[in-house]
């Protein structure tokens, strides 16, 4: 597969020296990090792409897409994206905003009249699209609850990665039955907000979410491998594995619950969801795609947004909207419109520039965009959670910036 046309032209400079004399990533350092993670059996397989100055300067598929079958990883492998879906669906909403078809400060009820979750005192505050995009709407996730008897579990809410058998409308109805965790706009918590945003995109576009995303984002960028499900027998689909410290990663053969954070019930995964065309389109966790496709989106945004968005809207996406609020396990990061934004590299112990965008995906993915250094990096793996939040992620970041 050629990547000659994979990355759209950048509107920024392609100079060889950026960010105070830094001259770009050293591929040998990146390869050493990937080789070590594979040798340590922290990863089974991965695709890593690095773009600098608008050019793809490093690309590698390594390890195995299916360990038991001996199937090598390939550069055009397909992955279950999990939360990598969030910036894609958030971009779709921003395209609609750029077209004047919705406003970021619109109440959610303009588009979803029945979506009226209440606070514990019974009041029903106004939620806005901007609050959905920044995860400040007061919503939560089932997998964050400490027991199987939490309010999301009692309401039968799907986090978008299990085989629930629900429709999107029904899942939104159930989410709305769960009490808000705080008054909208007064705190930050990672949440099902992007699933609700998907419902808004459907309503504002007048099309089912998969069609809307294709029309607004993936079609214009020729992201032909990215959608809400893969063909059942597409041998490019990577097999998922669960990383267990001290042992070889365990193959995920069927529905699996994997602890994501200490003291929580964990995420309910069903790998078969990725090939189930009847599964509801989860805007926050339900897509399938390739590393090359996602790099096209990142480089489009890093380069100013054309042909999807004007630069001002991209700048708004990449601005820290939440101040010091952000992920508890990622000090120094706030949140923009669809992804986290670095505001304090010292607190984050990171070599990245202020304003760097970053997020990941629970099936084992990480990505970041450092606009000051003209950098976009995509690392899709088939090993959770090492590929999302393990040592590999920090080692790769440091190797790219070395």
Image (spheres, rainbow, N blue to C red):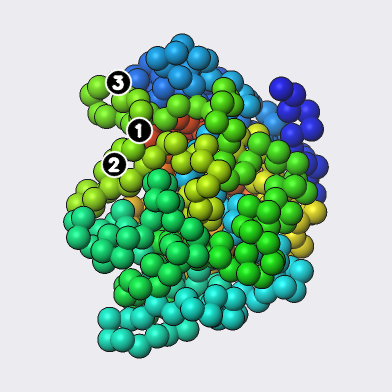
Task: Please indicate whether residue 232 sits to the left or right of residue 55 in the image.
Answer: left
- Decide which of 113, 359 is in the foreground and name it: 113
Element on which disc 3 rests: strand
- Decide which of 121, 206 is in the foreground and name it: 206
Q: From the image, tell me which residue sits under label 2.
A: 257
On the rendered image, what quadrant is the N terminus found in? top right
| CA distance separating discs 2 and 1 | 10 Å
| CA distance separating discs 3 and 1 | 18 Å
Single out the mark in the foreground, 2 or 3.
Answer: 2
Q: From the image, tell me which residue sits under label 1.
A: 254
Quadrant of residue 270 within the rendered picture: top left
Residue plotted at (51% across, 53% down): 280
Q: From the image, tell me which residue sits under label 3.
A: 248
The x, y position of residue 320, in whole percent, is 53, 65
Single out the mark in the foreground, 2 or 1.
Answer: 1
Element on which disc 2 rests: strand
| CA distance separating discs 2 and 3 | 18 Å
Q: Is residue 230 visible?
A: yes
Q: Mark on residue 91?
A: none
The local crowd at label 2, few if under 14, some if 14 to 19, many if 20 or more residues have their Cα within 10 Å, is some
The x, y position of residue 34, in whole percent, is 47, 23
Q: Residue furthest top?
A: 70
**Which of pointers 2 and 3 lies earlier in the amino acid sequence?**
3
Residue plotted at (77% across, 49% down): 220
């Amino acid at each position: 597969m050629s990547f000659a046309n994979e990355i759209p032209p950048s509107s920024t400079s392609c100079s060889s020296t950026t960010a105070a004399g830094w001259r770009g990533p050293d591929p040998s350092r990146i390869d050493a990090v990937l080789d070590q993670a594979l040798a340590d059996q922290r990863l089974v397989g991965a695709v890593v792409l690095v773009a600098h100055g608008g050019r793809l300067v490093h690309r590698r598929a390594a390890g195995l897409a299916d360990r038991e079958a001996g199937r090598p990883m390939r550069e055009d492998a397909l992955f279950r994206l999990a939360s990598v879906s969030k910036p894609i669906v958030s971009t779709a909403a921003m395209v609609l905003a750029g077209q004047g078809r919705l406003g970021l400060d619109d109440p959610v009820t303009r588009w979803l009249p029945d979506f009226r979750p209440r606070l514990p005192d019974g009041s029903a505050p106004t939620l806005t699209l901007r609050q959905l995009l920044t995860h400040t709407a007061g919503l939560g996730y089932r997998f964050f609850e400490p027991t199987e008897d939490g309010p999301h579990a009692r309401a039968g809410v799907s986090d978008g990665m299990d085989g629930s058998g629900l429709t999107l409308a029904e899942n939104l109805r159930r989410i709305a039955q769960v009490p808000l965790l705080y008054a909208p706009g007064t705190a930050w918590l990672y949440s099902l907000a992007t699933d609700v945003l998907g419902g808004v995109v459907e309503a504002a576009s007048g099309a089912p979410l998969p069609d809307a995303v294709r029309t607004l984002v993936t079609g214009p960028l020729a992201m032909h491998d990215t959608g809400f499900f893969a063909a059942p027998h597409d041998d490019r689909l990577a097999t998922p594995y669960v990383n267990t410290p001290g042992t070889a990663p365990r193959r995920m053969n069927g529905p699996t619950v994997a602890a994501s954070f200490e003291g929580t019930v964990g995420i309910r995964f069903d790998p078969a969801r990725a090939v189930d065309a009847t599964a509801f389109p989860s805007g926050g966790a339900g897509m399938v795609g390739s590393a090359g496709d996602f790099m096209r989106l990142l480089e489009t945004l890093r380069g100013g947004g054309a042909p999807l968005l004007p630069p001002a809207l991209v700048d708004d996406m990449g601005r820290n909207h939440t101040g010091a609020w952000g992920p508890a396990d990622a000090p120094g990061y706030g949140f923009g419109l669809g992804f986290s934004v670095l505001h304090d590299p010292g607190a984050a112990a990171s070599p990245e520039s202020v304003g760097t965008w970053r997020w990941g995906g629970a099936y084992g993915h990480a990505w970041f965009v450092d606009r000051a250094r003209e950098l976009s990096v995509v690392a899709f793996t088939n090993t959770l959670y090492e590929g999302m939040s393990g040592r590999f992620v920090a080692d790769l970041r440091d190797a790219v910036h070395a």
